Amino acid sequence: MADSIRVFQTPTFRKTAKKLKPNQKEELDAAVQRLIHDPSIGEQKKGALSCLREYKFKMNKQLMLLGYSFDDAELTLELLALGSHENFYRDMKRP
């Protein structure tokens, strides 16, 4: 199943990922690979963010949140946002 999943990045995610250092990009790539192999490992959010799943991982000993959505019917994984816990949810609620 992992080979047939299409992965998309939102402009917000792409912009944040572009600013990372090479060692941070390696850790992000490893986290994305874990999501591709098992998209259900992230926590489904509730309320206004019910369309969002969140995967927590460490990047340089700091907890990072990776917001994504997964459509099982179309086998698509959309990477929405990346950031630390501070203001993550507030920024995700913005249109």
Image (cartoon, rainbow, N blue to C red):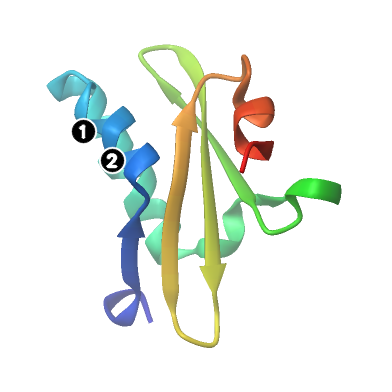
User: Is residue 59 in view?
Assistant: yes
Q: Amino acid at mark 1?
A: Glu
Question: Which residue is depicted at the point 38% across and 38% down?
Answer: 12
The percent coordinates of residue 68 (x first, y second) are 52, 52
Say which label, 1 or 2, has the lower sequence index: 2
SS for callout 1: helix
Query: Which element type, helix, strand or loop, lies under badge 2?
Result: helix
Camera-near label (1 vs 2) is: 2
Picture quadrant where residue 73 is located: bottom right
Q: What separation in Å lies between label 1 and label 2 (alpha carbons)?
A: 15 Å
Q: Position of residue 42 (x, y in %)?
A: 61, 50
Q: Disc 1 marks which residue?
A: 26
Q: Nearer the viewer, residue 28 or 79?
A: 79
Q: Is residue 91 above or below residue 85?
A: below
Q: Residue at horizontal 33%, vertical 61%?
A: 8
What residue do we see at 25% from left, 23% from top? 24
Q: Which residue is mark 2?
A: 14
In screen coordinates, is 52 left or right of 62?
Answer: right
Residues packed near mark 2 inside 10 Å, few (<14), some (14 to 19) or many (20 plus): some
- What type is the residue that disc 2 sits on? Arg
